[in-house]
Image: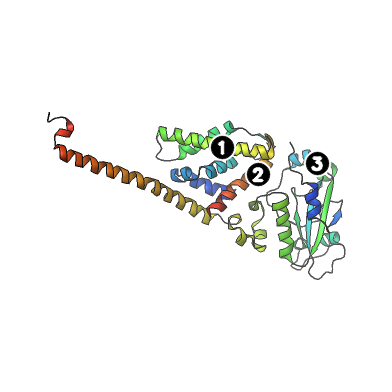
């Protein structure tokens, strides 16, 4: 048993062809997955595998020379360095992990934030097999994933359908039974009429 | 997770539980799984959560409860068998929760 499921190396290679690889922890940035693993499991995992981070660097003008440095130092357009770099990883990076884990960080330049986030989303869902609800809602909204798969963002419609279909099903199953009972009642009444009012109860004998 | 909790709330209604047994069983399993640590996949581990769910259900006779309990445990057994094939008999709670959550989402997609 492994606490985190490692990615198949062929899937990883296929997905990350063209990405810049660094044997370093991820730079500062925004994590796209909300539910991350806890510390103890990570240590167990690190004993066997590398920790892998994908960093999508938003660089609209192509001014960024060193992607890693851009995340760490350059201020973003909307004020913070974090807004430039989006990170996918199983664990939020912290300094203690450096002693225990071997880390690989893959970086790629994107001219469009939507593309950047969608790539991370696809990696998480299709390569890592993470349920879409684990991703943060703003990420799902920006990528347009809420329109593709509404359940990932809002379950209220599904909830209504759940109740609706259950009620409908109950009515469907109740109706034939009711009809059958009615028919039986009519049959009994007719029989009673033929036999006379007291015959059916065994009193008339 | 609010998604699971809100849907599980609906599963406390008898007609929903009867009509969507698999979905409710999966949600219940997700909700009653430990947050962390190692999980041994066993059907019997979910017997008490199912019993609690049935206790919350209004208007059930003892016979209804027994019948529904049997159906629920069958659905749980099937889900456990599926998960065992995917993640093995022993898994970390995190991995199991991830593998488990995909299933109710699929059920909901079918419904939508």
Q: CA distance from mark 1 to mark 3?
A: 33 Å
Question: Outermost residue toward the bottom?
Answer: A61
- Under tag 1, what secondary structure? helix
The residue closer to the viewer here, A31 or A48, is: A48
Residue annotated with mark 1: B76
In the rendered image, residue A16, in percent from the top left (x then y), is placed at 80, 55
Under circle 2, the secondary element is helix
Q: Residues within 10 Å of mark 2 (few under 14, many from 20)?
A: some
Judging from the image, mark 2 belongs to the subunit labelled: B
Locate residue A200: give its quadrant.
top left
Residue denoted by label 2: B99
Alpha carbon of mark 1 to alpha carbon of mark 2: how far? 14 Å
The image shows residue B52, relative to residue A104, as above or below, that is above
**Foreground label between 1 and 3:** 1
Q: Chain of mark 3?
A: A
Spatial CA span between label 2 and label 3: 21 Å
On screen, residue B74 versus residue A60, left or right, reads: left
Both labels 2 and 3 in a single chain: no
Disc 1 vs disc 2: Cβ atoms closer than 8 Å? no
Nearest-to-viewer mark from 2 and 3: 2
Q: Nearer the viewer, residue B77 or A152?
A: B77
- On the image, numbered disc 3 is attached to which residue? A46
- Residue drawn 53% across the image and 33% down it: B48
Direction from residue A148 to residue A111 in the image, left or right: right
Sequence-first tag of 1 and 2: 1
Residue at image x 18%, y 38%? Answer: A192
Chosen colour scheme: rainbow
**Any part of residue A199 in sight:** yes
- Few, some or many C-alpha atoms within 10 Å of disc 3 (few <14, some 14-19, many ≥20)? some
**Can you give x and y, in whole percent of width and height, for residue A17 in the image?**
82, 57
């Amino acid at each position: 048993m492994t606490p985190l499921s490692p990615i198949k190396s062929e899937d990883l290679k296929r997905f990350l062809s063209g990405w810049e690889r660094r044997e370093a922890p991820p730079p500062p940035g925004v994590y796209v997955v909300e539910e991350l693993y806890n510390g103890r499991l990570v240590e167990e995992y690190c004993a066997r595998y590398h920790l892998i981070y994908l960093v999508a660097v938003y660089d609209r003008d192509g001014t960024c020379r060193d992607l890693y440095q851009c995340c760490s130092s350059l201020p973003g357009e909307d004020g913070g360095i974090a807004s430039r770099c989006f990170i996918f990883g199983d664990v939020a990076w912290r300094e203690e992990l450096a002693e225990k884990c071997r880390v690989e960080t893959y970086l790629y330049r994107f001219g469009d934030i939507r593309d950047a986030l969608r790539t991370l989303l696809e990696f998480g869902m299709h390569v890592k097999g993470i349920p879409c609800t684990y991703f943060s809602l703003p990420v799902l909204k920006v990528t347009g994933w809420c329109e593709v798969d509404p359940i990932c963002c809002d379950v209220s419609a599904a909830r209504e359908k759940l109740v609706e279909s259950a009620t409908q099903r109950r009515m469907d199953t109740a109706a034939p039974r009711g009809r059958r009972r009615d028919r039986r009642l009519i049959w009994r009444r007719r029989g009673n009429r033929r036999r006379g009012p007291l015959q059916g109860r065994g009193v008339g004998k | 997770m609010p998604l699971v909790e809100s849907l599980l709330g609906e599963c406390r209604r008898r007609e929903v539980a009867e009509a969507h047994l698999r979905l409710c069983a999966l949600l219940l399993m997700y909700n009653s799984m430990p947050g962390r640590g190692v999980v041994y996949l066993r059907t019997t581990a979910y017997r008490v959560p199912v019993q609690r769910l049935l206790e919350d259900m209004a208007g059930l006779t003892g016979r209804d409860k027994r019948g529904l309990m049997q159906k629920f445990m069958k659905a749980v057994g099937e889900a456990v068998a599926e998960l065992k094939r995917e993640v093995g008999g022993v898994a970390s709670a995190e991995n199991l929760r991830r593998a488990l959550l995909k299933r109710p989402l699929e059920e909901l997609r079918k419904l939508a």
